[in-house]
Image: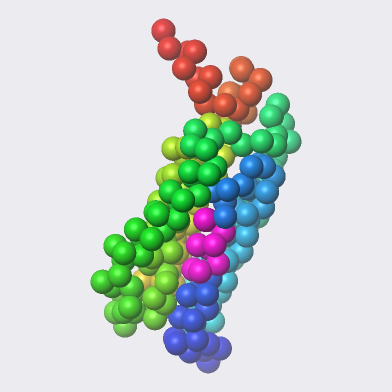
Amino acid sequence: MDVLSIEQAGTCVDAAALGLLALGLAGVALKRLEVAIIFLALQGALLGVATGAAALAEGGWRGWAAFGIALAVKLVAIPLMLWFVLNRVAVRHEVESVVPLKLAVPLATGLVLFAYWVARPIASDPLGGQHGFDAPNALPAALSLLLLGLFTMATRRKALTQVIGLVTMENGIYLAAVAATGGLPIAVEFGIALDVLTGAALMALVTLEINRMFVTIDTDRLRSLRG
């Protein structure tokens, strides 16, 4: 017996999407790496809420397996990995930005408004037809996270912050997939989780190597390697 109806699950997914959007937008203004990692973990928790709502609506073991994988990777594994790296780099706190904060926040807000404008034609309908949830904010929030993650990667110099931007982008894709399919199949869920975990691990190793060579995690220092 399903614990939640499709309508109730859609409401939960929509609320989680708004929370993810708020975290992604607030992350643009963060100046400390510790807080940025905590915000990323909170994103994982909200994705867990969305996946859990889908599992409660579906009522099968596959939904709960997907829920467990989402929490294990996005709430636990990736934030702990980034925290491990943070404790071993020379610069831990201030996050340098190519774009001044006074300009970055309006630009990020503009990206969110653009995402809502682009997604307006389909945002009012249940994503994926009868298989998706009626969550009108899910697709705009997912597109916003994708753009905000890309914006973070383009405007921040610290390699660790760029990893956070990459994971934020993937969180947006994941949110859209959950809302559109009513819960990802377990094989797809496992594949996505393994892919993002591998990517984050490789970038974390690169961050440690940059820190070892240059005693900093500023990616601008990589220009000195040009022959």
Give, as a single range, the part of the protein colored magenta: 17-25
Vertically, is 23 above or below 16? above
Q: Residue at x 39, y 81 (%)?
A: 134
Residue at the image point whose x is 67% and y is 42% from the top: 32
Residue 48 image position (x, y, % from top left): 57, 67
In this view, the residue farthest toward the bottom is: 1
Coordinates of residue 121 in the picture (x, y in percent): 26, 71
Residue at (56, 40) in percent of width and height: 161
71 over 206 or under it: above or below: below
* Rendered location of residue 23, percent (x, y): 57, 59
> Residue most toward the top?
227
Task: Say whether residue 29 is visible.
Answer: yes
Q: Is residue 27 above or below residue 8?
A: above
Is residue 195 visible to the viewer in this orientation of the structure? no
Task: Count the numbered circles shown.
Answer: 0
Q: Point out residue 159 in the picture as x, y percentages from the top left corner.
A: 55, 33
Quarter of the image that includes the C terminus = top left
In the rendered view, does 217 fall on the left or right side of 199? Answer: right
Residue in view at x 64 percent, y 42 percent: 31
Q: Is residue 18 magenta?
A: yes
